[in-house]
Amino acid sequence: MTNIKYTDVDYLFQLSCGYWKSHILFTAVEFDIFTLIGKGKLTARDISQSIHTDERATEMLLNALVSIELLTKHENYYSNSHISNFHLVKGAPRYMGDSMHHFHNIMENWTMLRETIETGKAVSLRDLPEEVDPHDTRDFITAMHNIASVKADALCNKINLKKSKMLLDLAGGPGTYAMALARANPNICAVVFDLEHVVKLTREFIISANMEDRVVTQAGNCLEDNFGEDAYDAILVSNLLHSYNPSNNTMILKKCLDALKDGGQVIIHEFVLDETKTSPQFAALFSLNMLIGTQEGASYAESEYKTWLENTGFKHISRVDLESNSTLIIGKK
């Protein structure tokens, strides 16, 4: 791709219109256009007839998708770009469409940013029903499976579990990381710990992957329940601590220490800020996403994770950056 240097005004236009591109992507995913085109190059008429849409409007959408490099166009025929074939065609090993659906679902929350900044409270949570919508849960867990599937290999390559036998995947959602780590380390079995309504879905992922003999589930609440005593050689805490305040995170890590055997390790997987809390960009933006969508969440700096680990009793703390936008902070008992 060509690097384009925008003027200051053009840069502001790019920021202001950024949501245009998001909606183009979300709409294409909702219509499953990339899966349709993945079967062979098609015209706008072919596509509009297949998805039951207006032909003129569909052609405009397809041309816009070409402009953002998700499709290519030759004469009147559209084909998927490499990135679309790899990540947006259903059935592809690294399919990301469900995570795009999740980002679409939370877009409305961002329209409440002004009021959230004024009040310091997650306005998006104000009128939510007490009962969790099973459809929303499935959407979220499936999106997390998409994202974890892309990162799993990199995570497995950076974690040493050669001497481990039991792994706890805390708030492990779909269990994607637990299953990937079990496959990469035939010596271990794993427990995925999450809320009752989540582990019902986790079991579906485990059965689908034929991993029932190596990975099991345990229902519980990480704030209310203990994780066991001297039970695990390793505990993965992936994308959990950004949902809570420092006090609760320290409490969770203390439970992890109690649940680990001597010499065991806790592996925190997060979007980690630098000490200015302005970089990396995704972690800084994600911190606002947590402000908007949780009661007390935020992105945190490496020094904060290290302080919680040290105060809890962990030693030999180290940092490992993954190729993606996330980082491992590892502590030993």
Image: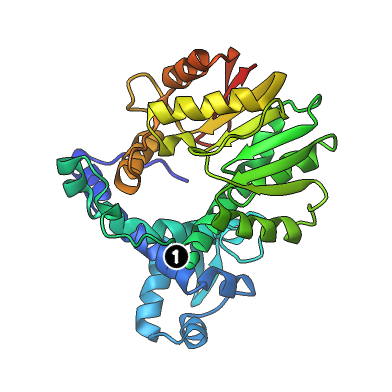
Estimate the x, y position of residue 179 in percent, counting from the top left: 72, 46
Q: Hey, what amino acid is under mark 1?
A: Asp
Estimate the x, y position of residue 117 in percent, counting from the top left: 19, 41
Image quadrant containing the C terminus = top right
Residue at the spot x=51%, y=72% of the render?
A: 33
Q: Nearer the viewer, residue 175 or 29?
A: 175
Estimate the x, y position of residue 28 in percent, counting from the top left: 45, 69
As drawn, is 5 to the left or to the right of 111? Answer: right
Residue 219 visible in the current orientation:
yes
Q: Nearer the viewer, residue 263 or 181?
A: 263
- Toward which corner of the image does residue 124 lie, by quadrant? bottom left
Estimate the x, y position of residue 198 in percent, counting from the top left: 56, 55
Residue at the spot x=77%, y=41% of the render?
A: 182
Query: Element at badge 1?
Result: loop
Q: Residue furthest left?
A: 118
As drawn, is 174 to the left or to the right of 291? Answer: right
Q: Nearer the viewer, residue 140 or 200?
A: 200
As drawn, is 46 to the left or to the right of 297? Answer: right
Q: Residues within 10 Å of mark 1 (few under 14, many from 20)?
A: few
* Residue 98 higher or lower than 248, as above or below: below
- Toward which corner of the image does residue 183 lie, by quadrant? top right
Residue at the spot x=65%, y=28% of the render?
A: 259
Q: Which residue is mark 1?
A: 133
Residue at the spot x=60%, y=19% of the render?
A: 331
How many discs mark residues in the rendered view? Answer: 1
For the rendered model, the colour scheme is: rainbow
* Residue 81 higher or lower than 275, as above or below: below
Residue 69 visible in the current orientation:
no
